[in-house]
């Protein structure tokens, strides 16, 4: 029987390959950096982050969800909703928490220093969706754990949400062309590559917008949505101005960026 980790890894690899093929066949923007160099470091960071979680996190969200369900912890245990309705509500709650967390990581200076490493990628493609500082990953995991305990999120909902979150992050960071009509229809519900690319603009008003990772509704409901970049997708600047050299894309440089000003 497949474990949750095996399932997550398998789907991660499949989505990564599909998005990589898509952006290779139908690129949205010309890349400014060496793809091989960026991919080596961005995907190397994924492995490093997995190691950090193994070492520094005694339990993960799934483990806590199993315990919470066994002890009947959380608000949802008292609502007695139908199984499918509870499952959907769990996904919506977790997605809203990630949206809110994302805003906080932009607003709080020391958290922004961690998160800006994600934004310092000088191109945006499928691997950018996997590029996060390990300290941010650990903080995010604790936020999910507290959410699981508070609401009593089910183990299956935790696994499904983590799969959806990883897949949607790779999808909406893809440097791939989506027809305008398809983008228009899809972004009514989910975050598309064009919608999220605005978030990686060097224009600060655009950087601090479009915080959703999966559902697009939060940005529209809470007035954090900017439909298109001012300079257009082809001409907009991407990255963080103080980390513009190629060397800053090395793993060692990425890991120290939160502690440096350039």
Image (cartoon, rainbow, N blue to C red):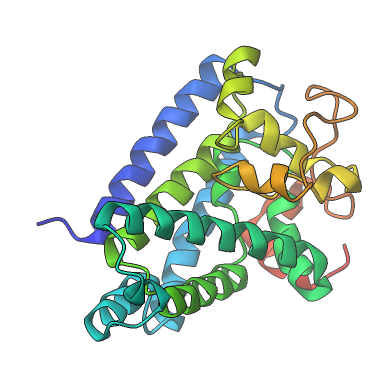
Which of the 4 image quarters holds residue 174? top right
Of residues 9 and 108, which is closer to you in this image? 108
Left/right placement of residue 262 relative to residue 47 reads right
Q: Which residue shows up at 38% across the image and 45% down it?
A: 12
Which of the 4 image quarters holds residue 115? bottom right
Above or below 40: residue 94: below
Q: Which residue shows up at 60% across the image and 32% down it?
A: 192
Where residue 261 sits: x, y (%)?
A: 88, 67
Q: Which residue shows up at 41% across the image and 60% down it?
A: 90
Where residue 156 sits: x, y (%)?
A: 27, 60
Above or below 196: residue 221: below
Of residues 92 and 212, which is closer to you in this image? 92
Of residues 197 and 78, which is closer to you in this image? 78
Instruction: Confirm whether residue 179 shows in the render.
Output: no
Where residue 211 sits: x, y (%)?
A: 69, 50
Where residue 247 sits: x, y (%)?
A: 74, 52
Q: Quadrant of the N terminus?
A: bottom left
Left/right placement of residue 89 relative to residue 156 reads right
Q: Quadrant of the C terminus?
A: bottom right
Which of the 4 image quarters holds residue 66? bottom left
Of residues 37 and 150, which is closer to you in this image? 150
Above or below 213: residue 108: below
Instruction: Confirm whether residue 101 shows in the render.
Output: yes
User: How many numbered dots are placed on residues in this image?
Assistant: 0
Q: Which residue shows up at 34% across the image and 59% down it?
A: 86
* Residue ranking furthest to the left: 1
């Amino acid at each position: 029987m497949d474990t949750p980790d095996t399932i997550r890894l398998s789907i991660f690899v499949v989505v990564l390959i599909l998005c990589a093929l898509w952006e290779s066949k139908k690129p949205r923007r010309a890349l400014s950096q060496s793809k091989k160099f960026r991919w080596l470091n961005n995907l190397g960071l994924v492995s490093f982050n997995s190691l950090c979680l193994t070492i520094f996190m005694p339990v993960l969200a799934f483990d806590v969800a199993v315990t919470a369900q066994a002890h009947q912890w959380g608000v949802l245990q008292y609502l007695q909703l139908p199984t499918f309705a509870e499952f959907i509500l769990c996904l919506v709650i977790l997605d809203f928490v990630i949206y809110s967390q994302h805003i906080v990581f932009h607003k709080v200076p020391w958290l922004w220093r961690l998160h800006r490493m994600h934004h310092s990628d000088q191109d945006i493609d499928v691997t950018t969706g996997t590029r996060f500082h390990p300290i941010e990953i650990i903080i995010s995991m604790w936020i999910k754990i507290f959410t699981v305990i508070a609401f009593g999120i089910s183990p299956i909902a935790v696994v499904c949400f983590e799969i959806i979150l990883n897949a949607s992050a790779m999808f909406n960071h893809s440097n791939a062309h989506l027809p305008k009509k398809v983008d228009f229809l899809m972004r009514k519900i989910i975050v598309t590559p064009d919608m999220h690319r605005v978030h990686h603009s060097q224009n600060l008003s655009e950087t601090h917008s479009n915080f959703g990772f999966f559902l697009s509704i939060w940005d529209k409901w809470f007035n954090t949505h900017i439909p298109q970049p001012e300079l257009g997708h082809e001409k907009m600047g991407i990255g963080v101005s103080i980390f513009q050299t190629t060397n800053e894309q090395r793993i060692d440089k990425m890991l120290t960026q939160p502690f440096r000003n350039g």
